[in-house]
Amino acid sequence: MISRVCLVHYHEIGLKGKNRARFENQLIVNLRHALKDYPVQDIKRISGHLRIRISDDQADEKILEAIAQTVSQIPGVARASLAFRTAQQEEEFCQAAVDALTQAAAARAASTLSGLAASGSFAVSAAASSDGFETFKVRARRSATDYHLHTLELNRLVGSVLCEHFPDKKVDVHNPDIVVHVNVVQGDVYVYAHSLVGVGGLPVGTAGKVVSLLSSGIDSPVASWMVGRRGAIVVPVHFSGRPMTSDASEYLCQDIVEKLKSAGSIGRMYVVPFGAVQREISLAVPQSLRIIMYRRMMFRIAERVARLEGAQALVTGESLGQVASQTLENITATNEVVDIPVFRPLIGSDKQEIIARAQQIGTFEISSQTAPDCCTLFMPRRPETHARLREVHAAEALFDFEAALEQLMQQIEYIDTGDCPSYKPPRELRTYHATLGPAAVPIS
Ligand code: ATP
Ligand code: MG
């Protein structure tokens, strides 16, 4: 009997040597979590892949497509293939090969057409106007040698059936439009030709925890997504201008976190109502140093949250020279106040590259909406671009930053996203937050 399954391929995990099982198990946990609303029967390791079986009575094409789409967004996944699982019977797997090629051709034609539509071109190419492909090849693989046909014989057998079914198509072993995979594994045969490209990286939960300074701007959501893709659990901290501004930026950050949900990397989000302390700072220090003072305060709070959470690094969306606070001198002046590493995944990226990634992960539109947050509050007319540490220290002596730090830690709020299966909230905070007022109750 032919049934439909999704095969999950990974590259980097395959290189992990002795740790490989840990990475694979984490990926299985993450996939289960991401697919909890789908009719998944089981997820199992088979010969260098993961196989996702769908409950028999609900195995329709649309569900399989949606599952593959969800899987492709999970860090650690290189590709998600929509496969046919058959018995080791020639008739069955050859029929599956015909179906797989037909399906892959339809997907190819659809993507060519949508590509043309997106580019605004009305010249429909030969590939798009025909049935999606001109050439193909078969790539057979046996994971054990207990099957009587060798891979070359399998290639020939399946290839000849496909040539019969698609008489106007040609075999091209070097550069085919479509590859039909035929994998003989543990008593079954898996046939597929249509795969979705995954995000790559490593499973979330294999690289520790980080605290990410998340604004509602374009850069920090991208930076957060990038470290999540490398396997880190991401705990966002947002500094709101409240009570001096509205809470609009907090809602934008919640929308951003909602978009990042598909990667399953976001843990609890913290919100710091920073407006009043910013006002104090702005009144106390020289105007040109305000931004550096705000940022030193933000880093101190983020480090405190990191300690509570057991996170080992901070992450920002800074890019060298992008704005006044991101010159080397000013980055140094901000870094000085924390002891844990600060990662800046976008430090060498241009804005256009960052925008392209933001569009891809779906945060760009949200980030393009303007909302006043702490960054827009009490800004100096001429910010210092090359801060001297001596002056920074002198300015900081003008207000009681220790007291402000304690005050902010008392007012911090959080929202539990439930997105990340490996995220464990800090025990210390359970009692800590129990003492806070109603505004600190988790919003969702
Ligand atoms: P983004 O860099 O996310 O587009 P932005 O351009 O408004 O936002 P910058 O002034 O470039 O922010 O700040 C540099 C970095 O500092 C941000 O990428 C982010 O990591 C952090 N940051 C800035 N504002 C905030 C905020 N309100 N809350 C949390 N982190 C912030
Ligand atoms: Mg920025």
Image: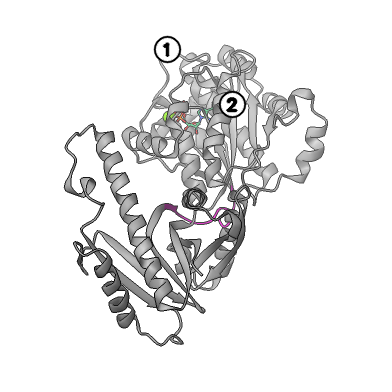
Going by the image, does 208 lie left or right of 375? right
Residue toward you, 112 or 247: 112
Up-down: is 151 above or below 164? below
Residue toward you, 85 or 354: 85
Disc 2 from disc 1: Cα separation:
21 Å
Residue picked out by circle 2: 239
Label 2 or label 1, whichever comes before in sequence order: 2
Residue located at (30% from left, 81% from top): 152
Q: Secondary structure at mark 1?
A: loop
Residue located at (30% from left, 64% from top): 179
Q: Which residues are magenta?
A: 198-209
- Kindly tell me whether residue 55 is visible in this rendering: no
- The verdict on label 2 being within 8 Å of ligand 1 is yes
| Amino acid type indicated by mark 2 | Phe
Going by the image, does 122 lie left or right of 285? left
> Measured from the top left, where is residue 239 in percent x and y?
59, 26
| Amino acid type indicated by mark 1 | Arg
> Measured from the top left, where is residue 369 in percent x and y?
46, 21
In terms of image quadrants, where is residue 182? bottom left
**Crowd around label 1: few <14 · some 14–19 · many ≥20 (10 Å):** few
Residue 361, numbered label: none
Q: Is residue 119 magenta?
A: no
Judging from the image, the colouring scheme is one colour
Residue located at (18% from left, 62% from top): 168
Residue picked out by circle 1: 381
